[in-house]
Amino acid sequence: MIRFEPRTNPSAFLVYGVPVMAAAFAIILAAIPLSLAGAPILPAYGLMISGAFGSLFSISEMLTRATPLILTGLAAAIAFRAKLWNIGAEGQLYMGAMAAVAVGSGVIDAPSYIMIPVIMLAGAAAGAMMLIGPIIMKTRLGVDEVVTTLLLNFIVLLFVQMMLEGALKDPMSMGWPQSEPIIDSAILPPLLERMRVHLGLIIALISAFALAIFVKRTVWGFEIRAVGENAAAAKFSGISVTKTMVLVAMLSGGLAGLAGVSEVAGTRGYLATDLSPGYGYAGIVVAMLARLSPIGVIISALFVASVFVGADSMSRAIGVSNYLADLIVAMSLLCVLIGGFLTRFKIHFGRQKSAG
């Protein structure tokens, strides 16, 4: 007989070691499909490491890929901490990118120190607005936000496609569905010469540290944690659950919107429907690996980004599909969920002793 007994005080090793062990175990498990594909295991992993960290260019590409992952990871982390299951970061990212393009492609012409904050605010506001509907339906009608936020991703993508074929279409794109380019003063400047890593990385890091301070050191942060732990008890103690949920929605959607601004103004310079390879969904994995810690999100985003960049390099070198990166990330999430369960519960085997 198997029994699960709640742990009253999990050790620090379990709390902080589980994500690390989950990531390591996922990489070990990835050796199985890698060997089935006929690739040499150790050389393949060596190529992954060198592809992500072997040169300044590789590191800059890894940091470039990590930038939107940090922001979408933060978006998921703050939402999940309040038990707001925001699965719509992908759509919020695209709305933020579209707002940045709408404002930054020539509607306003100003110096960089004005244009960059303006497009950031526009993108964050657009992403935040995407969560207003789901929050109203959740708090007033009891509608599951997992469904509404997930479905909004597809609605937003279709809306973006419509806009790229209409009002936002670049007349110089020769029929290709993409927006007009963002003006030079709205482009996020690179951090290294001839490298793609840009100012968005600094913005993402500042956002992570600011969110950590906000959650741990402010009254609003305490209310968010209280609602996440027990909404009924928080309401009984005088905390407005609805107001707290709206605040969380604004923060979560705004951070996802900033990820869109980072991509469109930092790496592309224009909006197209292939802007994101799934950063909104990968941000959920990043947040879970980080155990919803804003600082931990930085570390887990760097891990996920290094897997993606390393797998791309490995696939080109030995002819193995770069979908292995998606497999490793997915297995990391599965492992961390199992590890999280084992952190909260002890497993006992055998018969339960009867009283007396």
Image: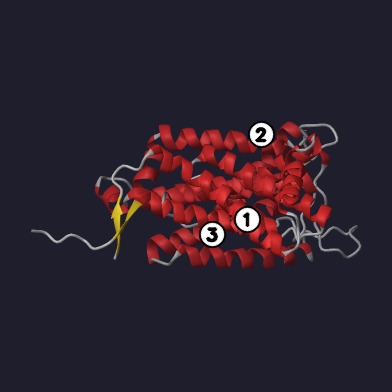
Residue 355, by quadrant, is bottom left
Relative to residue 210, is residue 10 depicted above or below? Answer: below
For the residues labelled 3 and 1, the Cα–Cα distance comes to: 20 Å
| Label 2 environment density (alpha carbons within 10 Å; few <14, some 14–19, many ≥20) | few
* Circle 1 residue: 328
For the residues labelled 3 and 2, the Cα–Cα distance comes to: 25 Å
Looking at the picture, which amino acid does disc 3 mark?
Ile
Q: Is the image coloured rainbow, by chain, by secondary structure, or in one colour?
A: secondary structure
Looking at the picture, which amino acid does disc 1 mark?
Ile
- Secondary structure of the residue carrying tag 2 is helix
Write the residue at 58% across / 53% down.
Answer: 26
Pick the residue in front: 221 or 321: 321
Q: Is residue 56 left or right of residue 9?
A: right
- Secondary structure of the residue carrying tag 1 is helix
Relative to residue 156, is residue 127 depicted above or below? Answer: above
* Circle 3 residue: 87
For the residues labelled 2 and 1, the Cα–Cα distance comes to: 27 Å
The C terminus sits in image quarter = bottom left
The N terminus sits in image quarter = bottom left
Write the residue at 91% across / 62% down.
Answer: 174
Upstream in sequence: badge 3 or badge 1: 3
Position in image of residue 188 (x %, y %): 75, 38
Position in image of residue 154 (x %, y %): 63, 67
Residue 167, by quadrant, is bottom right
Relative to residue 348, is residue 70 depicted above or below? Answer: above
Upstream in sequence: badge 2 or badge 1: 2
Pick the residue in front: 311 or 106: 311
* Disc number placed over residue 177 in the picture, else none: none
Position in image of residue 70 (x %, y %): 61, 44
* Circle 2 residue: 202
- Secondary structure of the residue carrying tag 3 is loop
Q: Can residue 252 be seen from the camera position used here?
A: no
